Amino acid sequence: MASSHTVLMRLVASAYSIAQKAGTIVRRVIAEGDLGIVEKTCATDLQTKADRLAQMSICSSLARKFPKLTIIGEEDLPFEEVDQELIEDGQWEEILQQTCPSQYSAIKEEDLVVWVDPLDGTKEYTEGLLDNVTVLIGIAYEGKAIAGVINQPYYNYQAGPDAVLGRTIWGVLGLGAFGFQLKEVPAGKHIITTTRSHNNKLVTDCVTAMNPNDVLRVGGAGNKIIQLIEGKASAYVFASPGCKKWDTCAPEVILHAVGGKLTDIHGNALQYNKEVKHMNSAGVLATLRNYDYYASRVPESVKNALVP
């Protein structure tokens, strides 16, 4: 019976199934061949048919099951009746079998804010860099990101025609993060992951100051956090506005649940209450380990240029 489970665990179990459905939509739009690309604010800020359909699916599925939630999605879409085939009402049973951390067991639906990025890495999606793409559903309570789901629609897509496509990672603070193998970058290696499509002098100056052995330039905040937890990168450094709350909410939870840290470039925690501004205007600094090493190397000139 659903009533025997806490609101939070029911929501995470539903978000898992809903994110999987959104991943299926993202793959289907590419397979059908018409991406329906629209420029939003500039040539690097794009929206596709997949963004639109996935957001309609996620937000409508959540709202139908949890009508008192506050749901904030990336795409500014007109209200319209959603096709029934976009609705996902399943929930992931393995999550329901987990015990909710005691500090969250009495949370009510109306206390939660859900931040949705239906397709993180849209530009890369349009260019065929499909492993950069994620679906992000982050859950916040009292301004703090506490639970999150990341679906990678194209995980395994280069493993051959018989490979099973896609995977879903999920986490709750105080419980852990699941769906991947935690791995660290070898000791003494400094590998930075940063933006592929929003580069500027501030970003470059900050990355250079980290004295990296290697720099990875990839799309998607969700993708970059996955690089941290799978040992491909040691720090995610983005010294620029441009990243939004829906980009960081779910990934932050996964990282924090395994002992990592994500802040703005000044070291401030990000806030996720419903009234907060959407832009992470003071950038992002995230690591799985050795956060202080990277934070200490952020140049004062970069800090002075980025106002929280």
Image (tube, helix red, strand yellow):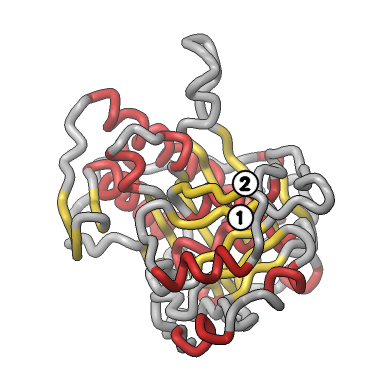
The residue shown at (56%, 53%) is 193
What is the number of the mark on residue 143?
A: none
Q: Position of residue 41 (x, y in %)?
A: 19, 65
Which quarter of the picture shows residue 180?
Answer: top right
Left or right for 291, reference 273: right
Is 175 located above or below residue 180 in the figure?
below
Which quarter of the picture shows residue 72?
Answer: bottom left
Q: Which residue is mark 2?
A: 227
Label 2 sits on what residue type? Gln
The residue shown at (48%, 80%) is 282
Answer few, some or many: residues within 10 Å of disc 2's Cα (few below 14, many 20 plus, some between 14 and 19): many
Precedes in sequence: disc 1 or disc 2? 1
Q: Which residue is mark 1?
A: 192
The residue shown at (46%, 61%) is 247
Would residue 152 be seen by someone viewing this image from the given angle? Answer: yes
The residue shown at (24%, 64%) is 76
Foreground residue among 180 and 65: 180
Asked which secondary structure carries label 1, the reply is strand
